[in-house]
Amino acid sequence: MAPVSPQYGLPGANLERLVHACEVLKPAAVYTEDAALFAEGLGSGALAGLPVIADRNARPGDLTLDDLKRGTAAAPVATPEQHAKYLLTSGSTGLPKAVINTHRTMCLNSAQIAACFEDPEPPVLVHSAPWSHILGANSILHYSAHRGRHFHAVGLAPGQHRRDLGRGFRQHHRQRRLSVG
């Protein structure tokens, strides 16, 4: 799995980074929360022929999350050393590079964060960190899973500011995601 920045596939985006991400990651499928919102990115030649899994507004031929839930679960085969996730760097010194996250690394990161807190009850977390950033993709997500709790990811709509976060949470805005993997 490799979450990519939503800006790579939004309307009007320069698709160069999405194309580069696909060249680096060589995805087998694409997940998007909203196929209509990311239609321009999903129409990129770099994604041609890849299965698309859409949570909302699936296009003809796309799979939905409900389709996947009806399928048969595969037997778990992951080992600690296997690659679990790739995170792309910001690309501030050129095009983004893929950083390997192994299953062991993600588990250790979660345990290290949990060791910082002495509370007997897992916390309730509300965050707006994008899944394409190390904080949102690993630290918050896996810490929540490690502690056995749910979290609510609050997404900021294009043009929305962090000062609007409370309003966004109350209105249950959802984070927009586009992942390749």
Image: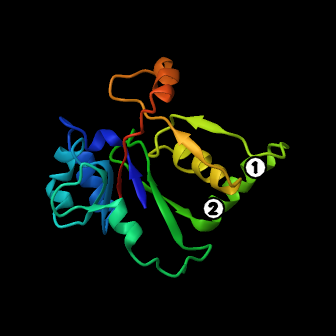
Q: Is residue 133 above or below residue 23?
A: above
The answer, for residue 66, to whether it is visible in the render is: yes
Left or right: 119, with 16 as reference point: right
Whole-percent x and y of residue 28? 31, 69
Label drawn at residue 105: 2
The residue depicted at 50 percent of the width and 29 percent of the height is 169
The residue depicted at 48 percent of the width and 61 percent of the height is 85
Left or right: 176, with 49 as reference point: right
Q: Quadrant of the C terminus?
A: bottom left
Q: Quadrant of the N terminus?
A: bottom left
Left or right: 126, with 133 as reference point: right
Front residue of this view, candidates 143 and 53: 53
Q: Secondary structure at mark 1?
A: helix
- Give the residue at mark 1: 114
The image quadrant that residue 69 belongs to is bottom left
Q: Amino acid at mark 2?
A: Thr
Mark 2 vs mark 1: in front = 1
The residue depicted at 46 percent of the width and 19 percent of the height is 164
The answer, for residue 181, to whether it is visible in the render is: no
The residue depicted at 50 percent of the width and 26 percent of the height is 170
For this orientation, the residue located farthest to the top is 163
Q: How many C-alpha atoms fall within 10 Å of the one at disc 2: few (<14), some, or many (≥20)? A: some
Whole-percent x and y of residue 154? 48, 35
Label drawn at residue 98: none
Whole-percent x and y of residue 175? 42, 39
